[in-house]
Amino acid sequence: MQPLVSIIIPVYNSCRLIDQTVQSVRMQSYTNWEAIMIDDCSTDDSYRVLKELESQDSRIKLLRMEKNKGPAVARNVGIANAKGRYIAFLDSDDLWFPEKLEKQIAFMNVKGAALSFTGYQKIDECGFGVGRIVSVPESIDYLGLLNASVIACLTVLYDTKIIGKVLMPESKVEDYGLWLKILKMGYVAHGLNQPLASLRKRRGSVSSNKLRAALWVWRLYRDSERLSLCRSSYHFINYAVRALIKAGI
């Protein structure tokens, strides 16, 4: 029998796009999954849409936060309620290719991987490809990841049978912090260099402000990873240079 995959989907004011996201999950060739949607006190029509989606498929489960806490807390609530061997993440405006889970789990079985990630494509707000396929390395360890954030949240799977349930740090770059947290245990993240997901780039999104995001990474090095000023500076320079190259600047 296929191991269960728990898909964590935090939602905040995403009523226009969440149906497309959930349908990309329902289209998976790998069928043994649960989608845990966590409404973070949306102020639009998201909760009504989520209730409708939940009624359409018994594998979809809806949770609602009592107060708006942000994506890190919402994702951790999802992880705490997850029943699956594998934990996956998907934001409420992103999409998966139909074979994403099937190919990635087969890849993890071959590699014996505790954590894996894949390539992806970038799409615009309307869902059209913007001609950018993002490739990923075969593997990366803790020190390598400090120098370059090459793991996209919507592509990750981690195996709780190997590492247990690991929660995201409550920081502004919580996903990056979680990958570092896992790799710091001594694991290596394995990359499947195939585009199996679509990352939607929206104007005005939290991640669209590059300077602010860079400052959050600096705070992660200093506060969460507790790196010295010298080590933080070294890794941050590497991170910044690679980010500029990736952006084509």
Image (tube, rainbow, N blue to C red):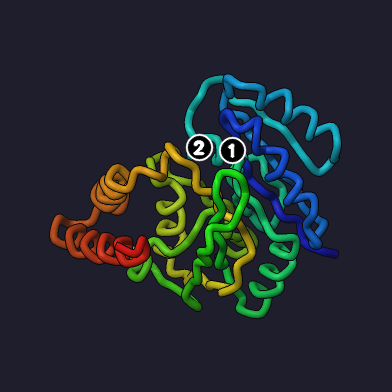
Q: Position of residue 68 (x, y in %)?
A: 51, 24
Q: Which residue is mark 2?
A: 71
Between 76 and 70, the one lying in front of the other is 70
Badge 1 local density, few (<14 within 10 Å), some, or many (20+)? many
Tag 2–tag 1 contact (CB < 8 Å): yes
Residue 35, label in figure: none
Residue at the (26%, 46%) spot, across then down: 215
Residue at 51% of width from left, 64% of height from top?
132
Q: CA distance from mark 2 to mark 1?
A: 6 Å
Determine whether the residue tagged by mark 1 lies in a helix, strand or loop: strand
- Quadrant occupied by the N terminus: bottom right
User: Can you give x and y, in whole percent of width and height, for residue 174 in the image?
Assistant: 43, 46
The residue type indicated by label 2 comes to Pro
Circle count: 2
The residue to which callout 1 is attached is 10
At 66% from the left and 68% from the top, the residue drawn is 104
Q: Residue reaching furthest left? A: 230
Q: In front here: 191 or 110?
A: 191
Rendering coords of residue 67 (x, y %) = 53, 21
Mark nearer the N terminus (2 vs 1): 1
